[in-house]
Amino acid sequence: MAQVLQVVAIFNPTPGKESRLKEVLLDLADQVYTNEPGVLKYKAFEQVDSQTGENVVLFEETYQDQATVDAHLSSSYFGAATATMTTEGLITKPFEIIVINPIGGFDRAEI
């Protein structure tokens, strides 16, 4: 059986462009849901720094295997979203992708 891959993607919005970034990312999530059944989770979160007011948008993603990741990264809508983020200046730096491996705890959805 192929190994499930878990990823966190981190996006740093340009001040004043947070809403547009979220719009682009949530549209991407809709495309992923519709077209990529091997993506088991693609969930957006927002973290706001209470001291600075700056926020970060994170995606928690679960893929059934590496081939699913590769297909996601090479999809036309992922490329279009990435291009939009760049050309519209929606992010202050390139987004970061972190592969994570669980070491403990639980997920009630798996029980």
Image (cartoon, grey):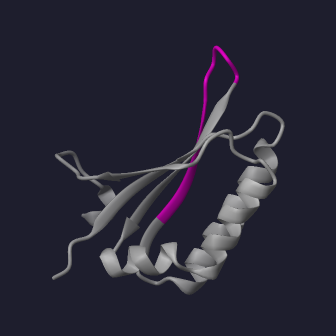
Res 42 visible: yes
Q: In the visual, does 38 lie left or right of 29?
A: left
- 18 within the magenta span: no
Q: Residue at x 66, y 76 (%)?
A: 77
Image point (72%, 55%), residue name: 86
The x and y percentages for residue 62 are 38, 65
Q: Is residue 19 left or right of residue 63?
A: right
Q: Is residue 105 left or right of residue 64?
A: left
The answer to whether 26 is drawn above or below residue 39 in the figure is above
What's the residue at 57%, 76% (across, down)?
32
Numbered disc total: 0
Image coords of residue 37 (percent x, y): 46, 84
Residue 103 locus on image (x, y percent):
17, 46
Q: Is residue 107 left or right of residue 27?
A: left
19 in relation to 27, above or below: above
Whether 68 is drawn above or below 104: the answer is below
Is residue 47 part of the magenta span, yes or no? yes
* Residue 29 found in image quarter: bottom right
Quadrant (top left, top right, bottom left, bottom right) of the N terminus: bottom left
| Residue depicted at x 62% and y 41% | 93
Please state, as top left, top right, bottom left or bottom right, where the C terminus lies in the image. bottom left
Magenta stretch: give its range. 42-53
Residue furthest to the top in view is 51
Residue 26 visible somewhere in the drawing: no
Residue 47 placement (x, y as % from top left):
58, 35
Q: Is 47 drawn above or below residue 11 in the view shown?
A: above
Relative to the observer, which residue lies in front, 39 or 85? 85
